[in-house]
Image (tube, rainbow, N blue to C red):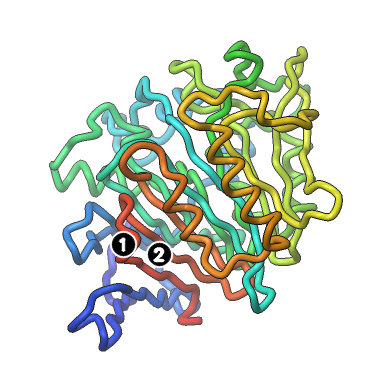
Amino acid sequence: MHYQFKKFKKITPYFLLTFPLLVTFFIDSCAITKSYIITEKIGIYGENLYLTKFVQNDYMDEIIQNKGFINDTQFATWANKKYFHNESIVVVPNEQVSGCLSFNFSSPNQKHMYARNFDFGQALPTIVTLTKPTKGYMYFSNTSYTVYTDKPTTTDPLLIQKLASVSTYVPLDGMNEKGLVVSMNNVNYYSGSLLVNQHYPNRVNLTMTLLFKYLLENAGTVEEAQEIINNVNIHDDLQTSGMSQHLQIADNLGNSAIVEFANDSNNTTQYVYPRTNESFLVNENFPEFGIDDWSQYDNTEGKYNRYASVHNALVNNNGVLENGFVQLQSNQIGSASTWSVIYNLTDLTMEYVWSGNFERKYSFSFCGI
């Protein structure tokens, strides 16, 4: 495992010297030829924000060949053996994500956009990961090591480096170089009675986060993502917490879909598409398949209020928003979302806000675009 820092370039625009609003990272990923994993803290304002570049074989072929994992405990065992000589670094916590929000929209100049709040707590350590696998598409993803360790408050720099080095396997949202975006939200299926565990014969088993990784590496469109989803067994992450997830995918052709699961013997996959005369979807913390009146659904923690706020803004503007961060900022859970991000699926860029500080944004781009 080779560690190299030379390829990482941080460019701070001149106006930041007097009025810090935006930090831009041009990732010269197209020129990468060597294999390495590097992590460094990039929060220049004191944010607990890290950037990991994972540029090497990620063993996904091996995982697929061995039929994958039916839960994140199996994955943790594999990761600790593969990367840490069986040291218990990756541990499944008994935690539950409290919210999250995602939606796709268009910019005034007709670019395809995707916005996302991840609501797990304020001021938590977060990791932006650039993954360039040996096979498959390159992608950015976001996560926090607090969702895959039992030491979420650690300040041990060596442990943080170890946890960040496997962040590529635990994406909670991300975008690849083809403009495909995927994110997950917690969902209360059928009053909490459903945990997704598909058991179709002769299929690979993937936990939700590993499914994300596999989609980002192998799908360039919503249609291609659905083809993969329809041919694997999907299993919820964090099942020990009684938690279930649904996901939203979108591409730079303007297509989008929400992926949910039925309360039947095989948790049949179900898709939600934009309504007639709408070009967008809003994904929250309640199931949307087959539901026409979301206002009658559970409004715990303002779930429907947040959905309605974003949906109404999109309807009133025909799916076009000047600044998607306005909706993200006004629909956080608690005092602040863990992170807020807007993906530009057309230009392949990502703008990132850490812990509700919307006046300070980090911008990431593939290949210096």
Q: Is residue 37 visible?
A: no
The image shows residue 98 at horizontal and vertical percentages of: 43, 30
Q: Amino acid at mark 1?
A: His
Q: Quadrant of the N terminus?
A: bottom left
Gap in Å between the C-alphas at discs 2 and 1?
A: 6 Å
Please name the residue shown 64% across and 22% down the image. Answer: 196
From the viewer's perspective, tell me whether residue 291 is left or right of residue 204: right
In this image, 157 relative to 314: left or right? Answer: left
Q: Is residue 264 above or below residue 258?
A: above
Quarter residue 252 falls in: bottom right
Residue 266 against residue 305 in the figure, above or below: above
Compare marks 2 and 1 and give the one earlier in the sequence: 1
Q: Give above or below for 158 relative to 262.
A: below
Residue 2's tag is 1
Classify mark 2: helix, strand or loop.
Answer: loop
**Which SS class for mark 1?**
loop
Q: Which residue is mark 2?
A: 35
* Residue 105 pos. (x, y %): 65, 60
- Identity, as a three-letter code, of the amino acid under mark 2: Ser
